[in-house]
Amino acid sequence: MKRFFAIGSILAALTLSACGINEEPKPTTSDEVPEILEVDLTVPVTATVGEEVFFTAVVSQGGKIVEDADEVMFEVMNLTTGEKEMIEATLNKNKHYEIKYTFETNDMYDITSHVTARTMHTMPTKQVTVTGGENATTTTEEEASHGEDLHQEQVTTIDFTEGTTTVGKATMLVANVSLSDAPLEGARVQYEIFRSDSHQHTWVDAPEKEAGVYQTEFTFTKSGTYDIEVHVTKGDDLHDHEKNTYTVK
């Protein structure tokens, strides 16, 4: 009888041990929102035809430099002709993505860094004014005066109000843009988003949903007070902006 009881106890212990081995660990869940991908784009404000210049993009996430971006491309677009080219950047010794570029004609150019990393994509844009070269022209005082009068007659209005939102919530950013009281269609509109206590700026393109209405969704990953500046460009004569604040809780 005692022998039977001992064998039964051993079998029970082995059964419990086997259940413990085969039991699958419970999955862990996390409500954390991924840190946003931030790009600090640096381009010269002005350049000269035939002069070699550098474009650099510092990519970071959560305050840490990103060296393993899937792709970083620089788009150089002539704002008058619409011609553009895409150039792949390389990581330099300072952990900055960089290209060298030489402009062949004078004009206004948009420089956009297309950055894909950590399943995210961002594309900040800055402008360069290129002067010099054989096709350089001299503006007369009369032409300059006429241009100023024309600019004064055509007043751009950007209706973008401040707001409040919460971390992790997709927030719709909407700007109503008009020129001389009529909806401005076909413009390029970008939101420049940055926290007041940070030097990192995030640029987001806003497509036109209807005549003069440009909107996009953005998810904030940290609380604080943010400045959001709306940049509106069209052709080489119109470039305006409006800034407001967003409180993120």
Image (cartoon, rainbow, N blue to C red):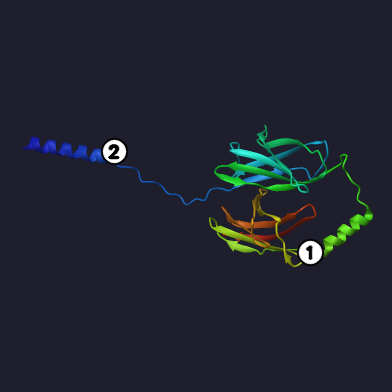
- Specify the quadrant that holds the N terminus: top left
Q: What is the three-letter code of the residue carrying label 1?
A: Val
Q: Nearer the viewer, residue 193 or 116?
A: 116
Q: Nearer the viewer, residue 204 or 181?
A: 181
Give the left or right position of residue 20, taking residue 232 as reference: left
Cα separation, mark 1 vs mark 2, equals: 74 Å
Instruction: Residue at 65% x, 63% y: name it.
Output: 162
**Dot 1, how many residues are within 10 Å of its Cα: few (below 14), some (14-19), or many (20+)?**
some
> Which quadrant of the structure image shows residue 6?
top left
Tell me the residue that label 2 is attached to.
Answer: 21
Q: Is residue 82 above or below residue 171?
A: above
Task: Give how far across and how far down residue 206 sits, in percent.
Answer: 64, 55
Give the left or right position of residue 55, taking residue 59 as reference: right
Instruction: Residue at 21% x, 37% y: name it.
Output: 14
Task: Give how far across and how far down residue 54 sits, in percent.
Answer: 75, 37
**Could you tell me if the residues under marks 1 and 2 are in contact, i.e. CB atoms within 8 Å?**
no
Tell me the residue that label 1 is attached to.
Answer: 155
Give the left or right position of residue 69, taking residue 183 as reference: left
Q: What is the three-letter code of the residue carrying label 2?
A: Ile
Going by the picture, which residue comes out furthest to the left?
Answer: 1
Quick one: SS at disc 1? loop
Q: Is residue 55 above or below residue 181?
A: above
Disc nearer the start of the sequence (1/2): 2
Instruction: Residue at 25% x, 38% y: name it.
Output: 18
